[in-house]
Image (cartoon, rainbow, N blue to C red):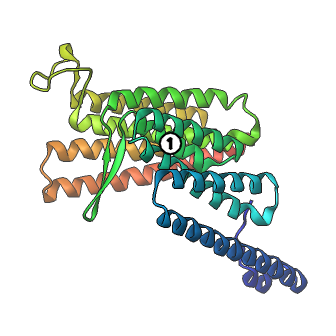
Amino acid sequence: MKVTLDLDELLHKGDITQAEHDKLSRLAAATTGSLAFNLLVGFGIVAVAAAALALVPTPLTAVVIGVCLLLAGIALYRAQLAQWQLLANICILIGALMAGGGLIVGDDGSLASMLTVTVAFALVSVFARSSLMAVLATLMLAGCIGSSTGYFHASYGLEIRKPIYTIVLFALIAAGLYRLARVMPAAYLKISEAAMRTSVFLVNFGFWVGSLWGDHLGRASAAEPTLANGYIGAPVFAVLWALALLAAGIWAWRRNRRWVLNTVAVFAAIDLYTQWFENLDADAGSVLLAGLLALAAAVALSFVNTAMQRRKTSLGV
């Protein structure tokens, strides 16, 4: 656990003695020096790996270098040396990305290669107890069913080709991870929580895209958008999204899950304003009213968070 303290202010107020101030300052300096050293070594490793890849720019080179970095990072992590943990995480992340990217490029982005990388990322997250790798594994799984991001000039894009599949798949994953967390060893709770939260975001992104463009299932034709030929319209997604958020919000309030409640509030606002500006012109009046609603929602959410925090404290959780 990391704690941020203003040592000079604590000394001035008399909360710590001069001896304690000097001791904590020395410890902080040692930690800062270790952090800087890890970062320098990490940047050096990245530079060497990038140079080697530039000299022999092939997918196989990326895979070999990535696997070597990944194994070195896992070994450092398993050694349980506190001063090398940051370097271990850098090696694990860069190695996994290089090896995974090389494998996917070498196999022309096939579904088999993406599934392999997804499983590999998941296994690495378990062995290295890395929440970031768990997030990457979850995102890779989304990529396996057609989700992706893109960059254009001064703008970014999110693509979800099958909203309904995304919603169902990641809702099941989130629910399954929540159930497993009850019997899972404490050391792996952060990993499952990271994957579960990422899944919750993907479910909402699926609803968001569906609420704008709907979803065609199977070989349904866009010329006749009806439920009979496998088309789910955008209004259906918008309504289902609102109902799902309402149910999740009620559950979060009863279970005192603040993160879930705050996430629900954010995506409820996104759902509201997406439909708002899709159906209303963005004139001065509608924008002003939307802003007032946002301020009122923010104040209400603050009161709700305070109430939930007090309830958590009173229950001793």
What residue sits 57% from the left and 32% below the top?
254
Q: Is residue 317 visible?
A: no
Dividing the picture into quadrants, the one containing residue 30 is bottom right
Per the image, the residue denoted by label 1 is 198
What residue sits 22% from the left and 30% below the top?
235
**Relative depth, front residue between 180 and 235:** 180
**Relative depth, front residue between 141 and 64:** 64
Classify 23 as above or below 80.
Answer: below
Q: What percent of the width, then of the height, locates residue 13?
A: 77, 82
| Rendered-image quadrant of the N terminus | bottom right
Q: What percent of the width, then of the height, locates residue 140?
A: 47, 41
Q: Amino acid at mark 1?
A: Thr
Q: Is residue 256 visible?
A: yes
| Rendered-image quadrant of the C terminus | top right
Decide: few, some or many residues near mark 1? Use Cα within 10 Å; few <14, some 14-19, many ≥20.
some
Dividing the picture into quadrants, the one containing residue 225 is top left
Dividing the picture into quadrants, the one containing residue 179 is top right
Determine the residue located farthest toward the top in the rendered image. Answer: 228
In this picture, residue 246 sits left or right of residue 82: left
Classify 296 as above or below 177.
Answer: below
Q: Secondary structure at mark 1?
A: helix
Q: What percent of the width, then of the height, locates residue 244?
A: 40, 29
What residue sits 69% from the left and 46% below the top?
129
Determine the residue located farthest toward the front in the rendered image. Answer: 56
Classify 201 as above or below 153.
Answer: above
Q: What percent of the width, then of the height, locates residue 117?
A: 53, 40
